[in-house]
Image: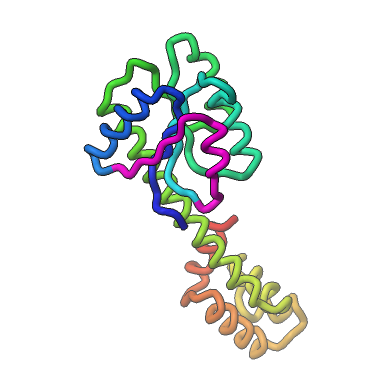
């Protein structure tokens, strides 16, 4: 995965330079592009961090770029830089999943704080997704019978009840239960329920 950073897309070179300096002064790694088209040409799904897009640009607008990235499955949080007249547009972007918008002229510290929050959010989401992928991989190792036993264990049923419901011996339930716990990397039914709830 690429290093998490702030990806600035703005067609105003002076703004790109000023923001690059501002964020580097707060130790936020930055990359910048002069247009939405230039960013799309370099876009890699492995990119991480967050995007700061100017709403109005020559050629493709920030909103159009946002829509294109969403269609491509990009999950990086997006913040928009807006002029005063663009607020209604920015609000509609929030409804479509943008994280935030910042009006120009903006307060430097406020902007950096919002970007740092977005970077932390992205990092947290990636950890959560990696955890979900790990649980899904462990679930895939369970046999059909182990899944049946697991569902009844998580439902809080005793081994004897599970044995009756599945028409198998209590000893067999105990063996399946032990395999489920081992494969899922848990020691208790409560732990098992917790990780299953976390992945929905």
For image coordinates 53% across by 69% down, the residue present is: 192
Left/right placement of residue 93 relative to residue 149 reads left
Judge by depth and name the residue closer to the eye, 184 or 145.
Answer: 184
Left/right placement of residue 66 relative to residue 79 reads right
Image quadrant assignment for residue 148: bottom right
Judge by depth and name the residue closer to the eye, 192 or 102.
Answer: 102
Residue 120 in picture, x, y percent from top left? 37, 45
- Residue 54 in magenta? no
The total of numbered circles placed on residues is: 0
Residue 10's place in the image compared with 141, above or below, is above
Image quadrant assignment for residue 33: top left
Judge by depth and name the residue closer to the eye, 165 or 150.
Answer: 150
- Residue 39 in magenta? yes
Left/right placement of residue 7 relative to residue 180 reads left
Residue 111 in picture, x, y percent from top left? 32, 28
Magenta residues span 28-46
For image coordinates 46% across by 48% down, the residue present is: 48
């Amino acid at each position: 995965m690429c290093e998490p950073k702030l990806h600035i897309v703005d067609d105003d070179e002076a703004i790109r330079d000023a923001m690059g300096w501002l964020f580097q002064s707060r130790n936020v790694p930055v990359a910048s592009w002069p247009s939405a088209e230039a960013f799309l040409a370099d876009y890699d799904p492995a990119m991480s961090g967050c995007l700061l897009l100017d709403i109005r640009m020559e050629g493709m607008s920030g909103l159009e770029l946002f829509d294109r990235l969403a269609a491509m499955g990009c999950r990086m949080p997006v913040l928009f830089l807006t002029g005063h007249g663009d607020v209604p547009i920015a609000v509609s972007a929030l409804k479509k999943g943008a994280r935030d918008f910042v009006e120009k002229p903006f307060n430097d510290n406020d902007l950096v704080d919002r970007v740092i929050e977005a970077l932390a959010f992205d990092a947290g989401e990636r950890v959560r997704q990696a955890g979900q992928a790990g649980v899904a991989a462990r679930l895939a190792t369970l046999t059909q019978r182990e899944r049946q036993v697991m569902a009844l264990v998580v439902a809080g049923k005793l081994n004897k009840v599970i044995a009756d419901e599945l028409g198998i011996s209590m000893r067999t339930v105990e063996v399946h239960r032990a395999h489920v716990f081992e494969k899922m990397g848990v020691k208790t039914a409560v732990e098992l329920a917790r990780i299953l709830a976390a992945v929905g």
